Image (spheres, rainbow, N blue to C red):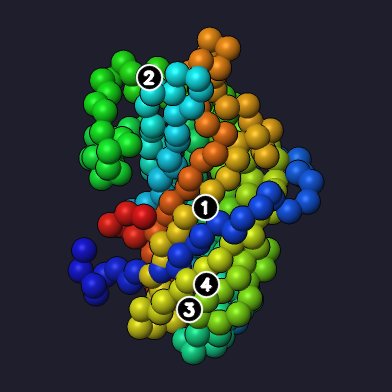
Amino acid sequence: MAASRVVILAGLLAACSGAPQGPAVAVAADDGLGAAPACAGAPVAIDGAHSRLDVLVFRGGVAERLGHNHVAQAQDLAGWTCLPARADDGELAGTRFAFRFRLDALRLDDPAARAALGPGWATSLDAADVDGTRAHMLASLEAAKYPWVSVRSVSVAWRAPALAAEVEIDLHGQRRRVPLALDVQPAGKLGAWTARGTLAIRQSDWGIEPYAVLGGLLAVRDELVIRFALQTNPVNGSTTTLSPAATGP
């Protein structure tokens, strides 16, 4: 895409070690996003057309070699970020952001996405395999009852490129806080940054029982890896877009 149309926002979100902070809090089954707050700098919203978020799912169980790893891709990312007045100087402490996607809109096991992930995803899956896996995945996640996943900042400290953040993740009707490290690079003007991120979570921390059959002979591992790249487009100097980069996480 032309540089004049898309400004890429980057920040590496690497999950810090350790369990989520504090007890889970029950939340409503809405998208959890909310309106962007008033900003000292330019508010920023997600450009879903140039966004990407991948969820990596790993095989497990006693006979895990008979199973498959999977990749699910968000199709409907949306959200916002609110930058401080001195963001152009790298002063990003106090930045606020939120984004969300629907579980029932995830695209599962796209052949190109699997090929890009390497040997662990090299097996070829037919349409029946993918449809069956998708049905099991959505049932385990109770996606009909809890369709939304949202991520919202609680705090952001330090200055670019190294930031320390704490975020709330709403998943499966529960909210947990997770510490994150961010690496952020500016891309020319206020509201324009390039971001890539990786977050590791355990399904069980949000009350989800990972899928298993035959007494655990074949199963999905508790751990999930969420990779995303966030991209921004300032609009008329007042509204911007936070979204994953088109080239993928």
Which callout, 4 or 1, points at the residue further toward the start of the chain? 4
Which callout, 2 or 3, points at the residue further toward the start of the chain? 2
Q: Determine the CA span between mark 4 and mark 1.
A: 24 Å
Query: Residue at label 4?
Result: 43
Which amino acid type is marked by label 2?
A: Leu
Query: Residue at label 3?
Result: 161
- Label 2 or label 1, whichever lies nearer to me, is 2
Mark 1 closeness class: few <14, some 14–19, many ≥20 residues within 10 Å:
some
Residue at 32% in and 54% down? 248
Which callout, 3 or 1, points at the residue further toward the start of the chain? 3
Residue 148 higher or lower than 246, as above or below: above
Q: State the image coordinates of residue 76 (x, y, percent, origin top left).
A: 42, 45
Q: State the image coordinates of residue 202 (x, y, percent, origin top left).
A: 60, 40
Relative placement, left or right, of 30 versus 57 is right
Relative placement, left or right, of 216 versus 108 is right
Q: Determine the CA span between mark 2 and mark 1.
A: 27 Å
Q: Determine the CA span between mark 3 and mark 1.
A: 18 Å
Mark 4 closeness class: few <14, some 14–19, many ≥20 residues within 10 Å:
many
The local secondary structure at tag 3 comes to loop
Q: Determine the CA span between mark 4 and mark 3.
A: 20 Å
